[in-house]
Image (spheres, rainbow, N blue to C red):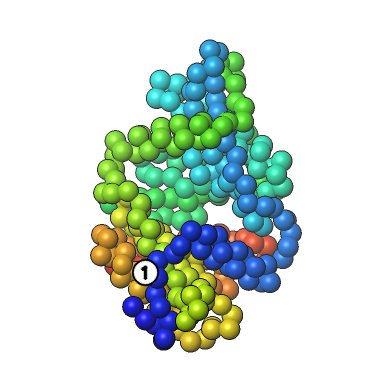
């Protein structure tokens, strides 16, 4: 397929990284440099007295002083004694240590939203019917402001478990544990499907790209949209995004999810994406949005 004389191709290895670098470079020109944090993934494992894995969490450090608690899991046999709270506090400690002043997370209605709210997290996004028949939430907590420390009624975890940095094997075990829990409520329709696409010129050079996938919960998840500065203003991003959406719908996607900052909100609005949540003053002096589009 051709768009305005450029060929549409699937992304090759390394293209997603290039698109993300270009998007970040543009973002650096729009947002203040502080607080400056680098992308990093931290894994923590909770071990019982015999060294067995009892739970864990995955914390992603992002730009502009934000951390994302992407995964938190506690073995079913270990629930009810405060281990989840212990892991949340460890994630907060690590995020502060890395220079973050904001901690975000996503959760579903069959997960632990009430626990997070007890720890001072506040709702900023509600996505209805995602996954199908359920609701998804995004919550945030400012780490640069005082907040009460929640201590669960049953708080035996500190005496029973030890939290320490985890390995890649631990990361996989924690992710698999959470996935198995989710499967009890929502079955994946399929594995994630890469639908990322790029435009290339006659020399095979990428001049625009969209990194995206169709998740097992049948949503198109947009990561980055980028057009080389030389080719902006010609509608290439819009047309390439429509091609990605077309492919996603063929793969069973019934909606699309994306996030953006205020300087790109207009672009996404013209493509039919609407805010379902707003994160104020992130990055500082700007607002970030979580977006959805129903097919």
The C terminus: image quadrant: bottom left
Residue 146: % across, % down: 69, 43
Instruction: From the top left corner, tell me how far across and down residue 176 is, in percent.
Output: 41, 35
Residue 159's place in the image compared with 130, above or below, is above
Q: In which quarter of the image is residue 49?
A: top right
Residue located 62% across and 60% down the image: 282
Residue 8 horizontal/vertical position (percent) = 39, 75
Q: Is residue 164 above or below residue 105?
A: above
In the image, 291: left or right of 19? left
Count of numbered circles on the image:
1
Q: Which residue lies furthest to the front in this view?
A: 203
Eyeballing the image, is 11 above or below 91? Answer: below
Q: Circle 1 is placed at which residue position?
A: 244
Task: Give the quadrant of the N terminus.
Answer: bottom left
Res 58 → quadrant:
top right
Find residue 91 and report its image quarter.
Answer: top right
Q: Is mark 1 on a helix, strand or loop?
A: helix
Q: Residue at x 66, y 38 (%)?
A: 94
Identity of the residue drawn at 38% across and 38% down: 179
Say which residue appears at 63% left-offset and 71% top-offset.
26
On the rendered structure, is 185 left or right of 123? left
Q: Is residue 273 visible?
A: no
Pick the residue in front: 46 or 227. 227
């Amino acid at each position: 397929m051709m768009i305005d004389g450029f060929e549409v191709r699937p992304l090759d290895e390394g293209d997603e990284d290039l698109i993300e670098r270009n998007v970040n470079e543009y973002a650096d020109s729009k947002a203040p440099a502080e607080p400056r944090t680098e992308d990093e993934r931290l894994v923590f494992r909770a071990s019982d007295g015999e060294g067995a894995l009892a739970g864990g969490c995955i914390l992603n450090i992002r730009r502009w002083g934000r951390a994302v608690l992407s995964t938190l899991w506690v073995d079913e046999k270990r629930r009810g004694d405060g281990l989840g709270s212990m892991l949340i506090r460890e994630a907060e400690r690590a995020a502060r240590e890395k220079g973050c002043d904001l901690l975000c997370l996503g959760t579903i209605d069959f997960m632990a939203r009430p626990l997070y709210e007890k720890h001072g997290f506040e709702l900023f996004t509600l996505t209805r019917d995602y996954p199908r028949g359920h609701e998804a939430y995004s919550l945030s907590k400012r780490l640069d402001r005082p907040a009460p420390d929640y201590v669960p009624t049953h708080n035996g975890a500190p005496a029973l478990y030890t939290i320490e940095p985890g390995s890649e094997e631990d990361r996989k075990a924690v992710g698999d544990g959470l996935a198995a829990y989710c499967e009890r409520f929502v079955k994946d329709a399929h594995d994630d499907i890469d639908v990322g696409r790029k435009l290339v010129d006659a020399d095979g050079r990428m001049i625009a790209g969209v990194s995206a996938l169709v998740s097992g919960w049948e949503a198109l998840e947009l990561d980055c949209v980028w057009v080389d500065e030389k080719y902006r203003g010609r509608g290439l991003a819009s047309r390439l995004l429509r091609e990605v959406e077309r492919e996603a719908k063929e793969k069973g996607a019934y909606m699309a999810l994306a996030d953006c900052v205020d300087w790109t909100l207009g672009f996404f609005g013209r493509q039919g994406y609407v805010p379902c949540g707003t994160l104020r003053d992130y990055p500082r002096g700007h607002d970030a949005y979580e977006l959805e589009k129903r097919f």
